[in-house]
Amino acid sequence: MERNDLVYVCSPLSAPTREEIAENMRKARSYAELVSAYFQCRAIAPHCFLPEYLDDNIPKEREIALAFGLSVLRISKALVVCGERISSGMKGEIRLARELGIPVYALVSYAGSTGLLRVQGKEERDEVQICKSCLSE
């Protein structure tokens, strides 16, 4: 990833309550700010703002929001997976990035440091965690 590259931030949005969805939107915005600042790129997380305009519970609006996100992903230089679980929407984003040859990374923090690990291989069946054995430097 090079300075000022467009980077797609992938993190969970769906949640049981509106409050939890709003919290996931805040987290997505925070992830995008962190990735932008730390890696000197232009990170975007469409799901940090689209739910303010398009209702995920209305199928046509959800379809439009997903299509918008995937359009942004198509022009991105990398995808960064953030958070502690992989939702079904994230799986689709990761799958498309791999099909398009866009590098997929996981944002990790350890002992006060933040970094990216390149995700190799296939997705794990368990969508709750990113399997550490699938990550390499």
Image (spheres, grey):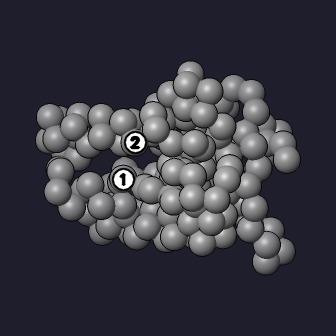
Instruction: Residue lying at the far top in this picture: please name it.
Output: 99
Q: Classify residue 135 by image quadrant.
A: top right
Question: Residue at position x 41%, y 63% from top?
Answer: 24
**Badge 2: residue crowd in 10 Å (few <14, some 14–19, many ≥20):** some
Q: Does residue 136 appear left or right of residue 59 in this picture?
A: right
x, y (%) of residue 33?
51, 70
Pick the front one: 41 or 65? 41
Give the mark, 2 or 1, whose residue is nearer the N terminus: 1
What is the three-letter code of the residue carrying label 2?
Answer: Val
Residue 72, numbered circle? 2
Question: Residue at position x 85%, y 47% from top?
Answer: 137
Disc 2 to disc 1, how far (Cα)?
A: 8 Å
Where disc 2 sits, the SS reads helix
Q: Does residue 15 appear left or right of residue 64 in this picture?
A: right
Q: Does residue 106 appear left or right of residue 56 in this picture?
A: right
Question: Residue at position x 14%, y 34% from top?
Answer: 60
Question: Residue at position x 32%, y 67% from top?
Answer: 22
x, y (%) of residue 15?
37, 54
Instruction: Residue lying at the far bottom in this picture: please name it.
Output: 112
Residue 21 to residue 30: above or below:
above
Query: Does residue 23 appear in this view?
Result: yes
What is the three-letter code of the residue carrying label 1?
Answer: Pro
Residue beneath disc 1:
46
Q: Are marks 2 and 1 in contact (CB under 8 Å)?
A: yes
